[in-house]
Amino acid sequence: MAKIRIFAKRPTPLTDQNIVTINNFTSEFDVDIFKQVDDGTPELLKRLTLTPASTPPPPPPTGNKDRFGMPFLHPTKPSGFFYEMSDDPRNDQAMDHVDTEFTVAGGVITMKPNGPTSFGVGRNIRKFKDSFGGCKMDMKAVARRGFAAFEDDVRDLEYKVLMSVKGIGDHGISISVCTGHHDSNASFDFKGEKVCCQGCAYMFNIDSQTKPMKMRFEKEQWHVNYVTSPEGWFTHKDVSAKLDGAGFVGIGICRYNKTVDDNPEHDHVILEAYVNPNPETNPDNWIMVKKIEDFTGHGWGDKGDYCPNAAKDQALTWSNAQNRLKTNSKQGSIDFKAISFREITA
């Protein structure tokens, strides 16, 4: 995909400059608009994706349930992005990395884990190369801008899946949101650790072997540095089964920002975790098992400042291109179906 970069130099406003005209294009273009900050380095202002007129936008959802009969937990954002897994998910443009560890049949994705194994969904996941800055992503700049890769990546979201876990041992399963590449090869050395800042994420993690099911929120401050939320591990009175061997169980996460003032760097992040213990017989039975709030200064994590311009407990207030399902197991299998990913108004 072609890319055009435009630099706005003071004092002439960018809007007064006739810089470039693109007509009759047949493939997508990314247009990155930068400004020069005080130290002379470019800072991204906006990324525009120009799509040929012949490419129709995805249809908006109708009603209050997805195609699998699962209810919407939050209202849909008007004209927001909405992805529902098809019966042929390898060809879904909003899904990627269903590769050699996976088989697909009958609308079910089967993962045969081999160490850290994952796949993901996202509006721009197939054209994603790197978050801005890559492993040295400037978190203050990203927080101010509101996105780490593409301006139309989904930030406020509802992400649900039905999964059947079989014999993966004591490794759990996680559903993570708003993350970039977890690239150890491109990481940099800091205080004796290898750091990749674009790999930051919020995660809902489920222990596959405990009964009743133990769950927690984690923050990956950078790859690889996981911190359990201050609430720690938790259970819920209506979720008694062990995940491994329970058949299909519904797992979901909602993530959205709460505005506190006019500075987007001060936004809070709300995380909600959901489980449906019996989605095939009771698709409406989505239970919110925990709701928490994160903000810079809350104390969740103490190594965020290993990344450029970040606080020790930096809240991850921005969007990013990938939203992943992952396990570290090297055995067993996990079946996934009925994946939906929707932009919400909360």
Image: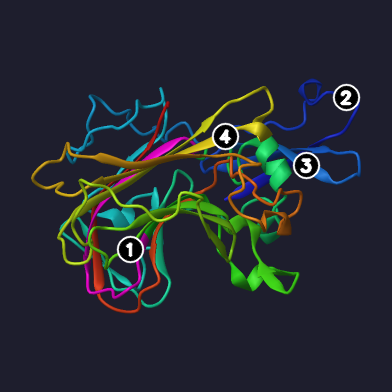
Mark 1 vs mark 3, foreground winner is 1
Alpha carbon distance from label 4 to label 1 = 27 Å
Q: Is residue 281 left or right of residue 132?
A: left
User: Which numbered circle lies on residue 207?
Assistant: 1
Q: Which numbered disc, 2 or 3, marks the residue that appears first in the sequence?
A: 2
Mark 3 vs mark 4, foreground winner is 4
Mark 2 vs mark 3, foreground winner is 3
Q: Which amino acid type is shown beneath numbered disc 3?
A: Glu
User: Which numbered circle lies on residue 12?
Assistant: 2
Alpha carbon distance from label 3 to label 4 = 24 Å
Q: Which numbered disc, 3 or 4, marks the residue that appears first in the sequence?
A: 3
Q: Residues within 10 Å of mark 3 (few under 14, many from 20)?
A: some
Query: Helix or strand or loop: what does disc 1 sit on?
Result: loop
Q: Which numbered disc, 4 or 1, marks the residue that appears first in the sequence?
A: 1
Q: Which amino acid type is shown beneath numbered disc 4?
A: His
User: Which numbered circle lies on residue 261?
Assistant: none
Is residue 323 visible in the rendered image? The answer is no
Q: Where in the figure is residue 134, as x and y percent of width and height?
A: 66, 57
Alpha carbon distance from label 2 to label 1 = 56 Å
Q: Are marks 4 and 1 in contact (CB under 8 Å)?
A: no
Is residue 8 visible in the rendered image? The answer is yes
User: Which numbered circle lies on residue 268?
Assistant: 4
Q: Which numbered disc, 2 or 1, marks the residue that appears first in the sequence?
A: 2
Query: Helix or strand or loop: what does disc 3 sit on?
Result: strand
Q: Which residues are magenta?
A: 154-173
Q: Quadrant of residue 24?
A: top right
Q: Which numbered disc, 1 or 3, marks the residue that appears first in the sequence?
A: 3
Residue lying at 33% horizontally and 50% vertically, measured from the top left: 92
